[in-house]
Each structure stands twice: as structure tokens, then as C-alpha cells.
Amino acid sequence: MSKVDSHIEKARALAGAVAVMNAFLIPLLVAAVGLPLIGELYLVTFEPAPWAAELGPYLAIMIKLLSYAPAIAAVGAVIVLSPVLVEYHEGRFTSKKASGAFQWAGLLALAAFMLKLLIVPLAISLLGGAFAWRFDPLDIALMVFASSVLMVGSVLEAAAASLKAENDQIV
């Protein structure tokens, strides 16, 4: 076995291990976001705080759903990466499926960032809630990371198209 084959096997094994870890952690992540959301929706509907009572149940529910939208988009980004790990574990490092999933994960992560930074605070204030614009350096890091994931997906898609074109010329 050559050194390259050894590295490929290690990468495949790592992808398989991370895929198993993802299969275990994704339901926990969904629960970590979903259960508090359900609890908060219950509270604003049946035991509203003064602000929710003043706005009414429909607007209070909309505000709570909007406040969780960035987390839901981020969870979606993590879930969308699962096929990438399966593809890598099977040795298909430049497949269209993997590159497409990378691009979707990057887009969802960027959507989470935009929702958190701009859309949700503005929408909540338009619905009558308090305008709360929170920005910290981690947001910049997440935006750069999400953009990088999107770029990696694009590069992998270009590499897959290039390999396919080369193989088509050979055949």
C-alpha cells in the first residue's frame, strides 16, 4: 500500500467515524433547538409574559419563531453535511453529491448569519417587539467559515466536472 493509499484510507476511516458521531449528535442538536422552541411557543400562547399578552398570541408566536430561525438554519447546515461524510467514507471525495451538500451547508450557514445579524432583529421590531441587535466577533468568524464552506463546495464541484471531462475524453 502506497503512502497516498494510506492517507486515503485514513481519511475514509475518519469520515466514517465522524458520520457515526453525526448520526448520534444531530438528534441531540435538533432536540437542543426544538424543545426550547416548543416550550417557548407554549408559554407565549398559554401563559404569556406581559410583552406577549400586549402583542397577542399570533405576533408573539411569530416573534418566537423568528428568534429561533438562525438556529434552525444552522441545524439545517449541519444536517446537510451528513451526505458529505457518507460520500467521503465511501471514497468519493469529488462527487457531485458531496460538493452540492457542501454548497448547501455553506448557504444555510450564511443564511443563519444573515438571519441573526439583520433579518430577525428587523422583522421582530416590525412586528412590535423590541429591536435587539447583537453583534460579536464570533459572528464574523462564522460568516468567514460559512463562506469558506460554500467556496469548498464550489471548488469540489469544479474538480468533479474536470475529472468527468477527463474521463469522458479517455473513453
Image: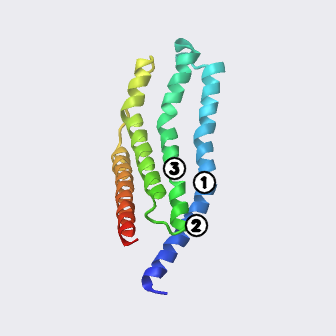
Mark 1 vs mark 2: give the one in front: 2
Label 2 crowd bin: few (<14), some (14–19), many (20+), radius 10 Å: some
Residue 99 position in % (x across, y down): 43, 56
Residue 84 position in % (x across, y down): 50, 58
Residue 29 drawn above or below residue 130: below
First in sequence, mark 2 or 3: give its number: 2
Q: Given the image, on which type of amino acid does mark 2 rest?
A: Ala
Task: Measure the C-alpha gap from mark 1 to mark 2.
Answer: 12 Å
| Image quadrant containing the C terminus | bottom left
Residue 119 drawn above or below residue 158: above
The residue beneath circle 3 is: 80
Residue 147 position in % (x across, y down): 34, 49
First in sequence, mark 1 or 2: give its number: 2
The residue at the point 56 percent across, 13 percent down is 56
The residue at the point 56 percent across, 17 percent down is 58
The circle on residue 25 is: 1
* Extreme residue in the bottom direction: 1
Dot 1: element = helix
Label 1 crowd bin: few (<14), some (14–19), many (20+), radius 10 Å: few
Kindly tell me whether residue 161 is visible in this rendering: yes
The residue at the point 57 percent across, 40 percent down is 33
First in sequence, mark 3 or 1: give its number: 1
Kindly tell me whether residue 131 is visible in this rendering: no
Tally the marks: 3
Mark 2 vs mark 3: give the one in front: 3
| Residue closer to the observer: 151 or 51 | 151
Residue 34 drawn above or below residue 162: above
Q: Given the image, on which type of amino acid does mark 1 rest?
A: Leu
The residue beneath circle 2 is: 17
Residue 30 drawn above or below residue 153: above
Q: Given the image, on which type of amino acid does mark 3 rest?
A: Val
